[in-house]
Image (tube, rainbow, N blue to C red):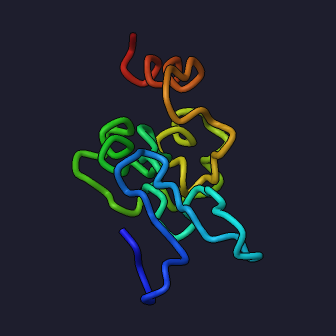
Amino acid sequence: YFPGTARCTEYINVDVPQHTVMRLHETGCGWVVMQSDRLPTPPAAEDPCPLMDDTEAASAAFNLGEHDPMICGFAPYCTHPLYARLCAVSCNSAAIPDCGDDDAAAAQLGGLLGA
């Protein structure tokens, strides 16, 4: 389509994935094809495994009997792998891989469960 004025200076092709734009060259002697910078970029994909404080899992792991939404507020426990994994945001555990196995945390949980 031709946006704007009666004098054709720009053509935007929205039928191709790249959304190309043809603009009249500034000299007026031809057209320049460009990728559009006016179209919104698609949203970034969501992180499939975002870091989070899982207070329900932490409450269960430490056998509190009921959910304690404040369980992740004890920074001294962040040195323990299981606590740091379950309370990743509160412990600022950016170095912990947010997906996959955590052998140290699993070993601590196994010890708590008597396994």
Q: x, y (%) of residue 25?
A: 70, 70
The quarter of the picture where residue 58 lies is top left
Query: In the shown orientation, is residue 3 left or right of residue 77?
Result: left
Instruction: Please name the residue shown 53% across and 26% down the image.
Output: 105
Foreground: 44 or 113?
44
Total marks drawn? 0
Residue 104 versus residue 3 in the image, above or below: above
**If the image is split into quadrants, where does the N terminus sit?**
bottom left
Foreground: 42 or 22?
22
Instruction: Please name the residue shown 60% across and 47% down the image.
Output: 77
Q: x, y (%) of residue 9?
A: 55, 77
Q: In the current view of this chain or complex, which residue is farthest to the front?
A: 29
Q: x, y (%) of residue 73?
A: 51, 62
Q: In the current view of this chain or complex, which residue is farthest to the left?
A: 66
Residue 76 versus residue 95 in the image, above or below: below
The quarter of the picture where residue 43 lies is bottom left
Instruction: Please name the residue shown 43% across and 55% down the image.
Output: 42
Q: In the current view of this chain or complex, which residue is farthest to the bottom?
A: 5
Residue 44 versus residue 62 in the image, above or below: below
Q: In the current view of this chain or complex, which residue is farthest to the right?
A: 27
Q: x, y (%) of residue 108?
A: 52, 24
**If the image is split into quadrants, where does the C terminus sit?**
top left
Residue 44 versus residue 79 in the image, above or below: below
Foreground: 44 or 38?
38
Instruction: Please name the residue shown 63% across and 36% down the image.
Output: 96
